[in-house]
Amino acid sequence: YVEAIHVLAPANPYPLIASYRFPGPHTPPRIETRIRINETQPVVVLAELNTGAVLAGQSDIRVTVSGCLTMSDTYDVDTLFQTRVRVEPGHPASVLTLITHPQETGLRTDAQGDIIPKRLIEKLEARFNGEVVFTADLYRSVAANPYLRFFFDPEQAGTLDLVWTEDTG
């Protein structure tokens, strides 16, 4: 089974976009998210299998207008860290989650031309009845307001806890 998926955009200033970990065969290796890419380029995906083998694939993505370096004055701190979660039952269950966060890369400037400091959501950990069922390591190329959809197939009813971690702790 697939233990991890790594997503890269080789032409981005920081090529590693995200790494997703599926700690067992009850977590199907499916993920949906939004990313930032700097220019038209291939996006590369590496899948690590539990046997140690690695599978690779890529898709050419065309960018007509890059949003990576657009000017920004500020963001609404009142809604910062607001999270939303929706679980759609089924086999496997679908978990959709989003956190309000600017995902500042440290590459953009404000209206005065000053660099906006890097500030990123770096990790999402999902635990079901205390057991880790999914983790995501997020890097500079994950879009603002990170959105993730992942799947898992619980054998019983229980509690799903999601923890988002920012680089500031």
Image (spheres, rainbow, N blue to C red):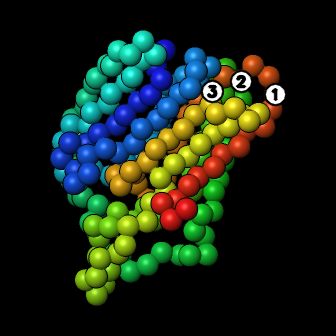
| Camera sees residue 3 | yes
154 over 146 or under it: above or below: above
| Camera sees residue 88 | no
Which three-letter amino acid code belongs to the residue tagged 2? Pro
Instruction: Write the residue at 43% across / 65% down.
Output: 119
Which three-letter amino acid code belongs to the residue tagged 1? Ala
Q: Position of residue 67 (x, y in %)?
A: 29, 61
Q: Are marks 2 and 3 in contact (CB under 8 Å)?
A: yes
Give the side of residue 142 with respect to residue 24, left or right: left
Is label 2 in a helix, a strand or a loop? Answer: loop
Give the side of residue 89 with respect to residue 37, left or right: right
Q: Which residue is mark 1?
A: 157
Q: Position of residue 91 (x, y in %)?
A: 67, 20
Give the number of the disc on residue 152. 3
Name the outermost residue toward the right.
157
Q: Which residue is mark 2?
A: 154
Measure the alpha-carbon separation of dots 1 and 3. Answer: 12 Å
